[in-house]
Image (spheres, rainbow, N blue to C red):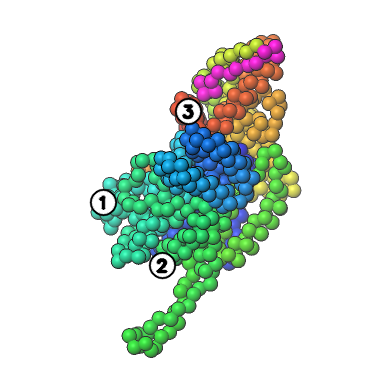
C-alpha cells in the first residue's frame, strides 16, 4: 500500500505500555533496561526513521525517481520517440507493482540500462545509468522542505550520543541504516559537536567528523580485502553504517566519508551484495548485547537472516588455557544471543473505513507476536501511531539518564491531565475564571490567525455556471474558529466506560476545553475525541498528536463531500507541556510528549443574510485541498512554507500563553 499521511490511523492514543508483547512475558521496563544498560547497542534504522524528512517509503521512492527520470527518455535527449512511450509504460508498470517494490526497482534499472546501451550504439554523449539513478534518488530524498518537527531521528541520535557520553567509557553504539539519505548523520554530527564543546576533556576526538566512524558497503569491502581494518575494527565508540549505500545531499558531501558506496536498488544489486551485506551486519554486531529495530517492516532479507541466526546461540571451539597452542584441550564456547527489541507502528487505517475494533487489533498484535517470536525477537513493542515511536525512545533515554525506574510517558500525561482538570473545573469559581481567560485568549488570536491563514491559502478562482471566472480574495472572505484541546482530562463520570468499568487510561482521550466563540462550562458535556468518533476538528487535534507535526486537513481527507460542512479545513498543531528550565538537552527532550493541541477551523465568511454559493464552496474546498496535498508531499514553495511555519509559531505562542493560565 502506498504510504500516505492521509491514511494515518485514527485511533485512541494508547501507548506501548498497555500493548507490550514479549516472548518471556516480561513488562516493557525490561526492554527499556536491555537498551539502557547495553555495553554495545546496535540501532537498526529502516525507512520509517527518515520519513519525516523524505516523505517517501520504498515504493514511493521508486515511483518518484522514475518520474524524475522522464527527461532521460525524451525525444530531444535520445532522438527516438519510442523511449517516451517506453517511459509511460515503465511508470504504469511501477504503479502495478507497488506491492512488489523489488520488481519495480529492477524494471527501472533495467530500462535505464537499455537507454545507456542505445546511447552507446548511437555514439551519443556518454550516459551512465547508475549516475542518472543516483541523481534522481538524491532529488527525491532532499527536495522536500525541512519538517517543522522531526522528533524520531533526533531522539535516535540523542539516545546514541547520550549512551556514548554516559559515565561508562566502554560503551559503544552502532547505528545501522538501510536508508540512502544522510539526515540522521547530519543530526548526529551536530549533537556530537555540541557535546564535545561542553564536555571539554573526553575519550572521543575533538572533531565530530573523527568522533563518528562512517561505514559504507564500498569502504567495508575495501577494508576486508586490505590490511587496513579501520572501519571494521575501529576503536571509535560511535559508528554509522550504510548497508545499501549512501547518497549525500547534492554536491555538498558530508565530511568524513571517503566512499559513498554502491547503491543497492534492484534485485540484481541485492543478489550481488547479499554476502557483503550479511558480513557487514555480522561484523558490526559481533560483540553487541542489544539490537534495537526501528522503522522497519522486517522484510529486509539480510535483517531476517541475521535474526534467525541470532535466535539460536552458536557454539564454537576455543582453546583452553591448558592446551592453548598445542592443538589439544579445546572446549566448546557458546556465543551469547543478542537481545533484540522491535518498536513498530501498527498498520495504517483509512479514514473512510470503519475503525478496527480493539479486540481485532489485539488479535492482529498477537499474530505479529507469534511471527516475531519465531524470528527471534525478544521484545515486541507495538505503538498505535507513528508519533508514539519517539515516546518509546524518550523512555529509553530517561532510563539511560537514570532519571526514572519506570516508563515516564504515562506518568507525565497523567500529571498533565490532572492539572488541567483541576484548573478548568467549571463547578469552582477558579475554574470558571480560568476557562473565561482561555476563551478570551482564543478570541483575541482569532483575527490574526485568519489573516495569516488567508495569506497561506492564497487567492481562489471561482468558475460560475455561465463560464464567468472570478477571483476571490481570502483576506476578505475567511473566518477562523480557534479551539484548545487537552489530553487526559476526564471527569469521574467520563472515566466510566459503556461497559460500566472505570477507564484506566484517560491519557488516550482529547477533550475540548474551550474555543474562541464559547466555553465548555459543563465538564460532563465536554466533547471527547475517541477513535470511533470522526468529527473533523476532533480528528485535527488527534491527528496532530499522532503525527507529531502541524497538519492541515480537509473534509475530503475524511471521506466527506465538500458540502458536508461550512468548515472546510482544519489546521492542527500539538505541543508538549512547558519543560522545566534546564541547560541539559536530554532533560528537555524528556518533556517532548504532546499534551494538548491548538486547532484552527477555517471556513468562508458569510455576510449577513448571504449564503455561500455551491461554486464558491467547491472552489474554496479545491484550494485548501491543494494546500493540504502540498504539505503532505513536502512541496510547499518558499512563500507557502513561510506562512505555514508562521501559523505554527502563532499556535505555539498561544499554547504557551494558555499554559501560563493553567497554574
Residue 57, can we see it?
no
Distance of label 1 from label 3 (alpha carbons): 39 Å
Task: Please state which of residues 435 and 254 is positioned toward the viewer in this rendering.
Answer: 254
Residue drawn 36% across and 57% down?
Answer: 219
Q: Which residue is mark 3?
A: 637
Instruction: Give x and y (percent) for residue 503.
Output: 66, 47
Instruction: Give x and y (percent) for residue 70.
Output: 52, 37
Dot 2 crowding, Cα within 10 Å, few <14, some 14–19, many 20+: some
Q: Which residue is mark 1?
A: 206
Residue drawn 47% across and 35% down?
Answer: 77
Asked if the residues shown at circle 2 and circle 3 are in contact, with their CB atoms under 8 angstroms apart, the answer is no
Task: Please state which of residues 491 and 598 is positioned toward the viewer in this rendering.
Answer: 598
Instruction: Give x and y (percent) for residue 108.
Output: 54, 46
Q: Which quadrant of the figure has residue 120?
A: top left
* Mark 2 / mark 1, whichever is N-terminal: 1
Q: Which residue is mark 2?
A: 287
Of the two numbered discs 1 and 3 in the rendering, the one whose residue sits closer to the viewer: 3
| Residue 464 included in the magenta stretch of the image | yes
Height in image: 406 above or below 625? below
* Mark 1 / mark 3, whichever is N-terminal: 1
Q: Which residues fall within the magenta stretch?
A: 454-467
Q: Secondary structure at mark 2?
A: loop
Distance of label 2 from label 1 (alpha carbons): 26 Å
Q: Secondary structure at mark 3?
A: loop
Residue drawn 61% across and 41% down?
Answer: 89
* Mark 2 / mark 3, whichever is N-terminal: 2
* 451 left or right of 425 in image: left
Task: Please state which of residues 660 and 143 is positioned toward the viewer in this rendering.
Answer: 143
Amino acid at each position: 500500500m502506498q504510504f500516505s499521511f492521509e491514511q494515518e490511523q485514527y485511533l485512541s492514543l494508547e501507548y506501548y505500555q498497555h500493548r507490550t508483547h514479549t516472548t518471556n512475558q516480561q513488562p516493557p521496563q525490561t526492554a527499556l533496561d536491555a537498551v539502557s544498560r547495553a555495553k554495545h547497542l546496535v540501532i537498526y534504522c529502516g525507512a520509517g526513521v527518515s520519513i519525516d524528512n523524505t516523505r517517501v517509503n520504498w515504493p514511493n521512492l521508486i515511483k518518484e525517481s522514475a518520474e524524475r527520470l522522464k527527461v532521460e527518455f525524451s525525444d530531444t535527449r535520445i532522438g527516438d520517440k519510442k523511449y517516451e512511450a517506453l517511459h509511460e509504460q515503465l511508470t504504469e508498470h511501477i504503479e502495478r507493482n507497488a506491492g512488489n517494490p523489488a520488481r519495480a526497482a529492477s524494471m527501472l534499472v533495467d530500462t535505464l540500462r537499455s537507454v545507456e546501451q542505445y546511447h552507446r550504439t548511437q555514439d551519443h554523449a556518454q550516459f551512465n545509468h547508475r549516475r542518472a539513478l543516483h541523481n534522481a534518488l538524491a532529488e527525491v530524498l532532499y527536495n522536500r522542505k525541512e519538517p517543522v518537527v522531526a522528533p524520531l531521528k533526533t531522539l535516535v541520535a540523542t539516545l546514541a550520543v547520550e549512551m556514548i557520553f554516559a559515565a561508562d567509557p566502554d560503551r559503544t553504539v552502532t547505528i545501522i541504516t538501510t536508508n540512502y539519505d544522510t539526515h540522521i548523520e547530519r543530526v548526529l554530527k551536530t549533537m556530537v559537536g555540541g557535546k564535545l564543546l561542553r564536555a571539554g576533556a573526553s575519550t572521543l576526538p575533538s572533531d565530530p567528523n573523527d568522533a563518528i566512524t562512517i561505514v559504507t558497503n564500498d569502504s567495508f569491502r575495501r577494508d576486508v580485502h586490505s590490511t587496513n581494518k579501520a572501519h571494521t575494527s575501529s576503536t571509535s565508540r560511535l559508528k554509522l553504517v550504510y548497508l545499501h549505500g549512501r547518497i549525500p545531499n547534492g554536491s555538498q558531501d558530508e565530511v568524513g566519508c571517503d566512499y559513498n558506496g554502491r547503491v543497492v536498488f534492484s534485485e540484481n544489486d541485492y543478489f550481488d551484495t547479499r554476502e557483503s551485506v550479511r558480513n557487514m551486519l555480522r561484523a558490526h554486531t559481533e560483540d553487541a548485547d542489544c539490537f534495537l529495530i526501528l522503522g522497519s517492516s522486517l522484510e529486509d532479507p539480510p535483517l531476517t537472516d541475521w535474526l534467525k541466526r541470532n535466535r539460536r546461540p552458536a557454539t564454537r571451539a576455543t582453546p583452553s588455557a591448558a592446551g592453548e597452542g598445542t592443538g589439544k584441550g579445546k572446549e566448546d564456547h557458546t556465543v551469547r544471543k543478542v537481545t533484540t527489541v522491535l518498536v513498530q507502528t501498527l498498520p495504517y487505517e483509512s479514514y473512510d473505513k470503519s475503525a478496527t475494533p480493539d479486540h481485532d487489533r489485539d488479535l492482529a498484535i498477537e499474530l505479529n507476536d507469534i511471527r516475531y517470536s519465531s524470528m527471534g525477537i525478544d521484545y515486541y513493542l507495538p505503538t498505535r501511531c507513528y508519533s508514539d515511536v519517539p515516546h518509546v525512545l524518550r523512555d529509553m533515554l530517561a532510563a539511560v539518564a537514570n532519571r526514572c525506574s519506570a516508563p515516564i510517558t504515562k506518568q507525565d500525561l497523567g500529571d498533565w491531565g490532572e492539572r488541567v482538570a483541576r484548573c478548568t473545573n467549571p463547578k469552582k469559581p477558579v475554574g470558571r475564571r480560568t476557562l473565561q481567560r482561555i476563551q478570551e485568549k482564543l478570541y483575541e488570536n482569532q483575527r490574526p490567525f485568519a489573516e495569516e491563514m488567508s495569506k497561506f491559502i492564497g487567492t481562489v478562482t471561482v468558475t460560475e455556471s455561465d463560464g464567468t471566472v472570478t477571483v476571490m480574495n481570502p483576506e476578505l472572505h475567511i473566518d477562523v474558529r480557534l479551539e484548545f484541546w487537552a489530553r487526559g482530562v476526564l471527569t469521574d463520570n467520563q472515566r466510566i466506560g459503556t461497559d460500566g468499568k472505570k477507564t484506566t487510561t484517560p491519557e488516550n482521550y482529547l477533550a475540548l476545553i474551550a474555543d474562541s466563540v464559547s466555553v465548555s462550562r459543563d465538564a460532563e458535556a465536554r466533547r471527547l475525541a475517541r477513535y470511533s468518533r470522526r468529527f473533523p476538528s476532533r480528528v485535527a487535534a488527534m491527528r496532530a498528536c499522532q503525527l507529531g507535526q502541524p497538519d492541515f486537513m480537509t473534509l475530503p481527507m475524511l471521506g466527506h463531500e465538500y458540502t458536508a460542512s461550512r468548515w472546510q479545513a482544519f489546521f492542527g498543531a500539538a505541543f508538549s507541556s512547558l519543560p522545566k528550565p534546564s541547560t541539559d538537552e536530554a532533560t528537555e527532550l524528556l518533556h517532548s510528549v504532546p499534551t494538548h493541541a491548538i486547532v484552527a477551523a477555517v471556513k468562508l465568511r458569510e455576510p449577513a443574510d448571504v449564503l455561500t454559493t455551491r461554486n464558491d464552496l467547491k472552489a474554496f474546498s479545491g484550494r485548501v485541498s491543494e494546500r493540504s496535498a502540498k504539505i503532505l508531499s513536502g512541496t510547499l514553495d518558499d512563500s507557502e512554507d513561510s506562512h505555514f511555519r508562521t501559523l505554527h509559531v502563532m499556535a505555539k505562542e498561544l499554547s504557551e500563553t494558555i499554559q501560563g493560565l493553567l497554574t
